[in-house]
């Protein structure tokens, strides 16, 4: 009997020891968790605040863009002026700008005019490249109330951010103000044109407000890059002469090798 009692006591003691050890481990883990909790809680709080703020701003953007899309279709509140707004929209399209700039470049009378038009063509191509790159990275869909017209079907754009018309309007306006426009009245007209083209994108429900705002900032900054990469007429002639000389050297080398083989 004594042996069995001692065995029971030993088993109870071992069980109590394991329970005490497990309870101590739980306390240690709880203390470790409580020690790490403040930092984790602060990080989670900051992430949640950032997410809430971002969603709130996007909700405001969606609501404001929907309210401003008053020319989205003929049945909209301002549907009667939709053709006029579409005409303003077309004035900021890349096709008329490229065609007009190339025509002026070919028909230029002075070297200075041709140099300015050449850099404007390069600026338009740079704008197309950068806008396409950002749109491919962001991949934001266009507003749901956007209506495809006959003209827009030839230039389908799936993505919305940023607005290419807004970037082009800001970049071309700054280019014209710096290089061609020298009177105050023309400056006002250029600025009004850029503002109307950018506003037409929201009125027609082509873009969100943030798309147009970021596009204006992006286009304004693009001109700084255009100034840094400005191509002079002499530099272009040197590049053309160098490429022509390289081609002539290659042709001469092939002819010399052919004659040497014979």
Image (cartoon, rainbow, N blue to C red):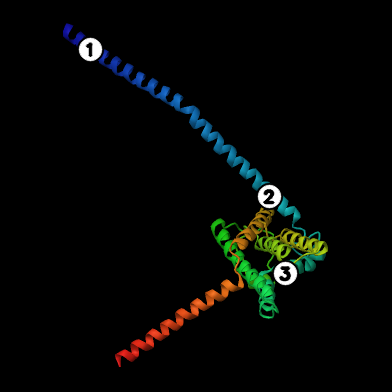
**Residue 188: which quarter of the image?**
bottom right
Mark 2 Cα within 10 Å, few/some/many (few <14, many 20+)?
A: some
Pick whichever of labels 2 and 3 is earlier in the sequence: 2
Residue 241 sits above or below residue 218 on the image: below
**Residue 177: which quarter of the image?**
bottom right
Q: What is the distance, in whole Å, between disc 2 and disc 3 at their CAs?
A: 25 Å
Please tell me which residue lies in front, 24 or 261: 261
Q: Position of residue 246 (x, y in %)?
A: 45, 79
Q: Position of residue 85 (x, y in %)?
A: 77, 65
Image quarter hosting the N terminus? top left
Q: Position of residue 99 (x, y in %)?
A: 67, 76
Tell me the tag on residue 90. 3
* Residue occupying image coordinates x 68% and y 67%: 148
Disc 3 on helix, strand or loop?
helix
Pick whichever of labels 3 and 1 is earlier in the sequence: 1
- 239 with respect to 147 (left or right): left
Tell me if I can see residue 191 in this picture: yes
């Amino acid at each position: 009997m004594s042996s069995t009692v001692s065995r029971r006591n030993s088993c109870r003691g071992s069980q109590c020891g394991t329970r005490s050890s497990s309870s101590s481990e739980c306390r240690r883990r709880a203390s470790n968790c409580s020690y790490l909790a403040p930092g984790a809680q602060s990080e989670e709080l900051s992430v949640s605040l950032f997410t809430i703020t971002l969603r709130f701003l996007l909700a405001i953007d969606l609501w404001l863009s929907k309210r401003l899309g008053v020319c989205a279709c003929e049945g909209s509140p301002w549907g009667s002026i939709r053709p006029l707004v579409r005409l303003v929209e077309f004035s900021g399209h890349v096709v008329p700008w490229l065609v007009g700039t190339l025509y002026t470049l070919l028909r230029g009378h002075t070297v200075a005019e041709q140099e300015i038009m050449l850099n404007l063509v390069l600026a338009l191509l740079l704008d197309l490249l950068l806008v396409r790159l950002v749109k491919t990275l962001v991949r934001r869909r266009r507003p749901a109330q956007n209506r495809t017209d006959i003209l827009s079907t030839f230039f389908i754009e799936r993505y919305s951010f940023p607005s290419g018309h807004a970037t082009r309007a800001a970049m071309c306006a700054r280019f014209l103000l710096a290089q061609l426009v020298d009177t105050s009245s023309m400056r006002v007209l250029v600025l009004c044109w850029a503002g109307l083209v950018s506003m037409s994108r929201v009125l027609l429900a082509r873009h969100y407000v943030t798309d147009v705002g970021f596009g204006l900032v992006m286009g304004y900054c693009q001109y700084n890059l255009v100034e840094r990469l400005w191509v002079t007429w002499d530099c272009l002639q040197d590049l053309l002469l160098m490429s022509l000389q390289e081609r002539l050297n290659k042709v001469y080398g092939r002819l010399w090798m052919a004659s040497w083989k014979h």
